[in-house]
Image (tube, helix red, strand yellow):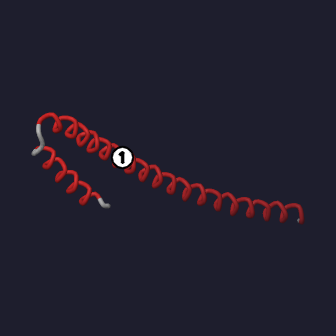
Amino acid sequence: MDEGVFKKKLNELVQEIKALPVAERQKLSMLAEETQQRHKELKETVNSLHESIDYLRLSIKYLLFDLEATRRENTQLRKMLEEQTGS
């Protein structure tokens, strides 16, 4: 179920709750509000996780770039040492 369908169904439920007698309405209204709040919190958590994953991916790319640069420098320095000791 996607976001739009969830919101639509929840709004339909809220409208049906409003048509109930007062005694039943209060309890169900409270549950519907809690559901909306939890959904909002879950959505924020998922967005935060997506941002963290994106940051992690970027960090890994930088680390891989740095590793490759270090390997190239290491190879170059070894070659220079071999040339100096060979001369």
Q: Which residue is mark 1?
A: 42
The reply, left or right, for residue 16 in relation to residue 41 is: left
Which quadrant of the figure contains the C terminus?
bottom right
Label 1 sits on what residue type? Leu
Which quadrant of the figure contains the N terminus?
bottom left
Q: Which corner quadrant of the image does residue 78 belong to? A: bottom right
Considering only vertical position in the picture, is 6 above or below 29? below
Residue 54: x percent and y percent? Answer: 45, 55
Of 47 and 87, nearer the camera is 47
Residue 6: x percent and y percent? Answer: 26, 56
Considering only vertical position in the picture, is 21 above or below 51? above
Mark 1: secondary structure: helix
Residue at 65% in and 62% down: 68
The reply, left or right, for residue 33 in relation to residue 20 is: right
Residue 5: x percent and y percent? Answer: 25, 60
Residue at 50% in and 56% down: 58
